[in-house]
Amino acid sequence: MPHAIADDGAEIAYQVRGAGPALVLLAGQANSHRWWDPVRDRLGAGRRTITLDWRGTGTSGPTDRELTTRRLAGDVAAVLDDLRLECSDVYGTSMGGRVAQWFAVDHPRRLGRLVLGCTTPGGAHAVERSTEVRRAMVQPDRGAARRSLLDLMYTPAWLAAHPGPTTVEGDPSMTPQARRDHLRASDGHDAWDHLPQVLAPTLVLHGADDVLAPAVNAGLLGRRVPGARVEVLPGLRHAYFHEGEEVATPLVREFLG
């Protein structure tokens, strides 16, 4: 598996599949590139899809206490450098959507089109998940915590028909410290003041019933990013891109062209 070298010398593992226009897919917090496995082939048909393992996941280097979403955007740029790609479309979901915001701000000439999924602008202007949701995710009973996470990701009907395991439950190879570093980076995200600088055509996608990253944030991003198009998908939760693939994937492919 190839590795890019970040500015600080960290090794960033990445994966390339297919041929055609480049599309970088950015996973959620505490997840590796496996996040995209169920939808990657159909989403990337006719394209060259590029995924990466965030620091602390997969075969990438370790995290540290200085980890931020803006720094992770630099890791995305390092992967493009290693591939000698001047420009790519980018689709980021959850924490990956936060990283994608910084990539759009810091590397505008390297970005074609931007898709932000189930994410928030961060900071004081974002609408955060409730205290109840946070507690449910960190309860000491690991089985109960897993069930709570899955309930935030998928509807009960979908879970009944697909007992799992799923690819969005976190990378099991992560250390507890790496999980904390990811949480700190994601919680510390705040791109609000910079979002009007985004030049790329932007699509914002969100599940209407998402309470992990409350759906109201889609409208906030849509009003903050110039010319952004917003699509809120009824009846779907945080993993809208998986459960609602039959709706979400065509929207993304049509937008990217």
Image: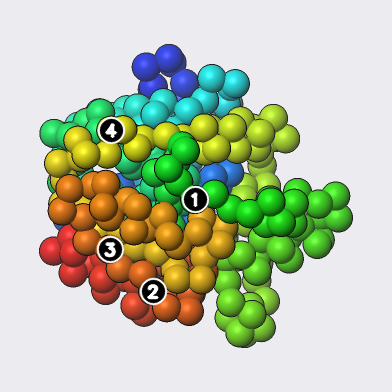
Q: Residue furthest front?
A: 125
Left or right, residue 223 beside residue 185:
left
Cα gap from disc 1 to disc 4, whole angstroms: 18 Å
Tell me residue 120's x, y (percent).
Answer: 42, 48
Q: Which residue carries the number 2 mark?
A: 233
Q: Which residue carries the number 4 mark?
A: 194
Q: Which residue carries the number 3 mark?
A: 230
- Residue 122 against residue 242 in the figure, above or below: above
Which labelled disc corresponds to residue 127? 1
Task: Give 5 or 88, whichever is nearer the viewer.
Answer: 88
Task: Give 1 or 99, whichever is nearer the viewer.
Answer: 99
Mark 2 and 1 residues: CB-CB less than 8 Å, in contact? no
Q: Give neighbour class at mark 1: few <14, some 14-19, many 20+ (Cα, 10 Å).
A: some
Q: Earlier in the sequence, mark 4 or mark 2?
A: 4
Task: Give 176 or 148, whichever is nearer the viewer.
Answer: 148
Helix, strand or loop for disc 3: strand
Helix, strand or loop for disc 2: strand
Which labelled disc corresponds to residue 197? none
Residue at 47% x, 38% y is 124
Cα gap from disc 2 to disc 3, whole angstroms: 10 Å
Q: Could one spot residue 219 in this view of the protein?
A: yes
Q: Could one spot residue 48 in this view of the protein?
A: no
Q: Give neighbour class at mark 3: few <14, some 14-19, many 20+ (Cα, 10 Å).
A: many
Left or right, residue 153 beside residue 141:
left
Q: Earlier in the sequence, mark 3 or mark 1?
A: 1
Residue at 44% x, 68% y is 207
Amino acid type of the residue tagged 3 in the rendering: Val
Cα gap from disc 3 to disc 4, whole angstroms: 19 Å
Amino acid type of the residue tagged 4 in the rendering: His
Amino acid type of the residue tagged 1 in the rendering: Val
